[in-house]
Image (cartoon, rainbow, N blue to C red):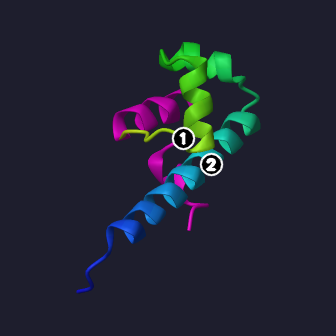
Amino acid sequence: MIQLSDKHIEKIKENFLVTIGKRIRAVRKEKAIRQVELGNASRKDRQYIYKIEKGIVTINVSTLKTLLLVFEISFEEFFEDIK
């Protein structure tokens, strides 16, 4: 087992948040849903949706699940293109 530095963990977190955000944006665009519409449907502020898509904020699992329900896709479908 390796020991990860705080810097390494922070870098992984940043990359992951950006990757998740880009995937959310791609699915939203694919479904032709505007940020404001996604925000309304998920009961989240449009600015919060923007921040998620840019990887600025940490998205929790329940928020991700809510967005996926709006998109009508599963976790498996969402993560299949993420490596």
User: Quick one: label 2, few (<14), some, or many (20+) residues within 10 Å?
Assistant: some
- The Cα–Cα distance between marks 2 and 1, rounded to whole angstroms, is 14 Å
* SS majority, magenta: helix
Name which residue type carries label 1.
Answer: Ile
Name which residue type carries label 2.
Answer: Arg
Q: Position of residue 13 (x, y in %)?
A: 44, 58
The residue positioned 51% from the left and 50% from the top of the image is 17
Which of pointers 2 and 1 indicates the residue nearer the eye?
Answer: 1
Q: In this view, does 18 lie to the left or right of 10?
A: right
Q: What element carries label 2?
A: helix
| Corner quadrant of residue 40 | top right
Q: Does the magenta stretch include residue 70?
A: yes
Q: Position of residue 20 (x, y in %)?
A: 55, 50
Residue 77 visible within the image: no
Task: Determine contact: label 2, label 1, CB under 8 Å.
Answer: no
Q: Residue 70 carries which label?
A: none
Q: Nearer the viewer, residue 3 or 67?
A: 3
Q: Position of residue 49 (x, y in %)?
A: 57, 28
The residue positioned 62% from the left and 48% from the top of the image is 23
Residue at numbered disc 1: 56
Q: Which of 75 and 57 is in front in this view?
A: 57
Q: In this view, does 34 lie above or below 16?
A: above
Q: Does the magenta stretch include residue 82?
A: yes
Q: In this view, does 24 lie above or below 31?
A: below
Q: Which residue lies furthest to the bottom in this view?
A: 1
Q: Position of residue 76 (x, y in %)?
A: 48, 54
Q: Residue 23 carries which label?
A: 2
Q: Which of 68 and 8 is in front in this view?
A: 8
